[in-house]
Every structure is written in structure tokens, then in C-alpha cells.
Amino acid sequence: MTKQTQAPLAPARILVLVSGEGSNMKAIVEAARAPYWGGKVVAVGADRECAGLEWAAEQEIPTFCHPFTRGTDDARGDRAQWDRELAELMAEYEPDMVVCAGYLKLLGSAVLERFEGRIVNTHNSLLPSFPGVRGPADAIEAGVKLAGATLFIVDPGLDTGAIVAQVAVPVEDDDDADSLLARIKIAEQKQLVEAVGRMIREGWTINGRRVRYGVEG
């Protein structure tokens, strides 16, 4: 990715993507209720019916579900077609920024090009270590002393995007994957709210692999 600058977006229109309970999405929604934070959640989308989608609907936030089914005659069984349809669905809400909060599908070229440099994802490890869905378990198995969470700009890879922010969480001697994940989630949600808020209020600059708050000339 070459150098890209994004001017402050506040008041920003934020679209959140989820796949499960939506705890990180709820943290963003709650933060957005404060006028000074700088944004508003205009829609929540999911790749499956889930508790996070139900909660958003209860909050009277517009929602949509766009599942992907492999091995069927449905057009959504085609990855490229699914991605193009998702891009169109997302664009209907005119988001300034997209936050993947526990979203379990890789986004394809249609979505990434439509919202280039404006999609962030939060992951429960200190990337580039331990990408994928087993971050805390992999950290325990590796015997590391520090785990944590990473917020990054989404690119075509699996948790490979340029890093916006990271927070470290010590691994305790008696931790298992579940107890470590529970503590990571607390730090992750705080970081997510603070970092996304700063991005929309201050803007950001992506220069190769480096991301900084504010607009650089």
C-alpha cells in the first residue's frame, strides 16, 4: 500500500460488521452515543444470523445479513459475487469508515477497493504473531509472556494489514486460552473505542506498513 492520507471524518458514519455476540460492536455503539467521540453507527451487518445483529436491531440501528454458502446453486456460493453484493449492501449506508468487530469472513477485492484504507479490524493477538481464530490459544501454547490485541487496516491477507494500535496483556502462569481471552477482550474493547475515535477525529496517514494518527503532508 502506498502513502494514503485520510482527513478527519467527524461526524463520521460508521458501519460495523459482526459474526457473533458483538461485544466489540456494542462498545462502539455505546461510545458513539457521546457527542465528543465523533461518529455514529449507521448500520450493522453480518454474514450470519447472530446475537450481535439482534441486539443492534433492538437499538433501532439498521441491520443486514449477507451469508455466504459454498457448494450451492445460490449466487452467494460464488466468492467474487458474494463480495460484490456485500460491497453494494455496505455502500447503501454511505459509511465513512468500516469496523470489523468479530467478523469471521475475509473481505474481497470489491469491498476493499470500494472502501480502501477505511476498513479496520480488531484481532486478539499482538500481530504479526498468532493470526487467525486461535490467537489466545496459540499464545498459551507458544509460552509467550505477553499477549494482547491489535487494530489494523484491512488488506487482502489474513490479519496482515498495517497496524494502527496495539495493547499488551500479560500472560499469567495459571492462564488457559479462555481466561487469557477474557482479559484480552477488556483491553481490546478499550483500545478499539479510543483508536477509532482518534482516527475519525484526527484523520490518519498510511505510509507503507506504518499508520499514524493525523494527516501528514
Image: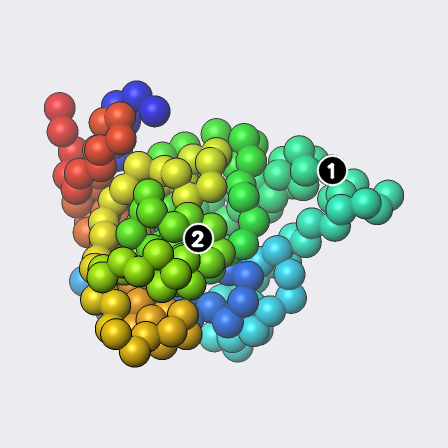
Q: On the picture, is 73 further left or further right than 139?
A: right
Locate the C terminus and report the quarter of the image it occupies. Answer: top left
**Protein image colouring:** rainbow
Locate the N terminus and report the quarter of the image it occupies. Answer: top left
Amino acid residing under circle 2: Cys
Disc 1/disc 2 C-alpha distance (Å) = 22 Å
Res 17 visible: no
Res 156 visible: yes
User: What's the mark number on residue 78?
Assistant: 1
* Front position in the image: 92 or 83: 83
Q: On the picture, is 89 further left or further right than 74?
A: left
When the figure is inspected, residue 206 is found, relative to residue 43, above or below; the finding is above
When the figure is inspected, residue 200 is found, relative to residue 141, above or below; the finding is above
The picture places residue 216, in percent across and down from the top left corner, at: 13, 29
User: What's the mark number on residue 184?
Assistant: none
Packing grade of label 2 (10 A; few <14, some 14-19, many >=20) is many
The picture places residue 69, in percent across and down from the top left corner, at: 74, 50
The picture places residue 174, in percent across and down from the top left corner, at: 30, 78
Amino acid residing under circle 1: Asp
Q: Which mark sits nearer the N-terminus, 1 or 2?
A: 1
Q: Secondary structure at mark 2?
A: strand
The residue indicated by pointer 2 is 100
